[in-house]
Amino acid sequence: MGVVEGRPGERTYTDGSFVYVSPSGSLSEQRRAVVIQAALLGAGSFDPAVVKALRGRSRAARRYLALEGHRVLNQIGRTLPVVASFELDTAPLTSDTAESLEIALGRRRVADPPIWFGVVRPSQLLAATGAAPGMSPTAQDLRLEFVESEVPLAEEDDEEGDQEERLRGKLFQNPLATSSTLTNFLSNMLGLSATPEKGEGAGGEMMVRSTRSHKQPGPNARPLPVPLRFVSDDTPGRANGVGGGLYPEWDVHGNRYRSEWCRVVTYPLAVVQDVGASKVEHDEILRRRLARLGLGPKVVRRRPDGDDLDVDALIELAVDLRTGQSPAEHIYLERQKLARNLGVLILLDASGSATETTHTGVSVHEHQRRAAATLATTLEELGDRVGVYGFRSRGRSAVQLLAIKPFGQRFGTNGRVQLNQLEPAGFTRMGAAIRHAGELLKSDAGTPNRLLLVLSDGFPYDDGYESRYAEADTHRSLQELRNDGVACLCLSIGATTASETLSRVFGAASHASARTLAELSPRMDALFLGALKELSVGQSRQ
């Protein structure tokens, strides 16, 4: 389980994979909050059947947290002496989860939990995949549902209450009265909350979450699309090669960048022992097409015709004539674009959305994984610098880049097995992954021509990252790289994404879609050259 900092003004909560700690609490309160949230998870207090019963009932969820929190802390306090220092003011009232849920849903008076207990957010727990980063996908991963929304919604569990309780409470509310004494008295008699929740007074039904204030940027404002800080993790005991960066994210609704908004972590996959899954499909058509790529000038000597005379060949011709031997006729130089000076980073979508199965019974992830292996092997054999990375995310603080083949390594048996055994999981915060991949290309490729090759179904999605917002950020990240001299080619293989959606997501970057890589192989050289066209033109002018 991971522990990350939550949003300002929010209480501590968990989604089953991470504990989002309130940044406003003291260090001791944060530690206690992590203990209670982790203890509730370990005790089974957040079982899906229980959480479903609390969904949409903020009062019941708060009562359940008070009851179950005291019960679980009392239970683990027998083995963890640190819990004894928490100084709980009440003894546990229940003996198991079922009893806590029954009382929480009833009318029996229950004291509010301490602030450091945090809150319960049923929608986050139900939406979580139930797997930690890097684990195999669960059934929830395979049933990702996308909700069309113009604005990323804020967390809502602590703002939504039980509808029935709201209606009953409003019967005794007078929006014109200045005193709530009578309302509180009647509420106590009926077992309702003594004081109305935040947003549940007169006018509390207004959807204040759905509004967003906009500020127009000044005429001289210029966003900074590059990472504001690049960090490397050298903590003792951590795997070699772990690093990452903090990156901005484009907010299309506010027409601005959110600085240091996403944290990207790059780390190598574990070394595999089983080498039986290292097979890579060979594509001769793809090889012949990519072999035509010549991006740098190369002088070919002793040609029958060409751009200039070959001095060495002329000297040999003169010697042959003086000695009476048959002279060589190939005395010209020809300058051709044959040099392989290309660096390619293949960025593979390893999120749960790629588990969609095609009509052939093969998943999108399998199609794109095979394509990544074939492309990497072919390009490396042709002499190009190649890197292979997978990406997925679990919120803006946990965007993961999985180093399958860094630029400094060969795509050998170990790398091929790691790629073939990569399982999709998590979500798709594509913009942050693209920005970090671009930084790796610029720092590690070591070639004048650089190409980012994205293999994805074209559906960016994450917590607070969906619909128009996600599409615009992905579009923007690709444009940033192209402005920085990095070519971009996006391929959607095996997916059923509409061409209009791919155009919105990938923008002006070169992109194509097909059922299999074999369908794209005959025109792969044209796709590569089309993506590199701007770079080639720029170099020819210099």
Image (cartoon, rainbow, N blue to C red):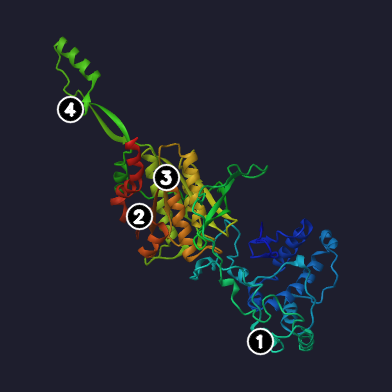
Asked if the residue under mark 3 is in contact with the one under mark 1, i.e. CB atoms within 8 Å, the reply is: no
Q: Residue 517 carries which label?
A: 2
Q: Nearer the viewer, mark 1 or mark 4?
A: 1
Q: Report the front residue among 226 and 334.
A: 226
In whole angstroms, how far apart are the C-alphas of marks 1 and 3? 58 Å
Alpha carbon separation for disc pair 2 and 4:
39 Å
Categorize mark 4 by other alpha carbons within 10 Å: few (<14), some (14-19), many (20+).
Answer: few
Mark 1 or 4, nearer chain start: 1
Q: Is mark 1 on a helix, strand or loop?
A: helix
Q: What element carries label 2?
A: helix
Instruction: Residue at 77% x, 73% y: name it.
Output: 66
Q: Residues within 10 Å of mark 1 (few under 14, many from 20)?
A: few
Indicate the position of residue 487 as horizontal and vertical percent values: 39, 46
Residue type at mark 3: give it.
Val
149 or 408: which is nearer to us? Answer: 149
Which of label 1 and label 2 is nearer to you? Answer: 1
Q: Residue 304: which disc?
A: 4
| Marks 1 and 2 in Cβ contact (< 8 Å) | no
Query: In what quadrant of the picture does the C terminus appear?
Result: top left
**Disc number lying in front (2 or 4):** 4
**Identity, as a three-letter code, of the amino acid under mark 1:** Leu
How far from the left and from the top, in percent, is residue 37?
Answer: 72, 65
Q: Nearer the viewer, mark 3 or mark 4?
A: 3
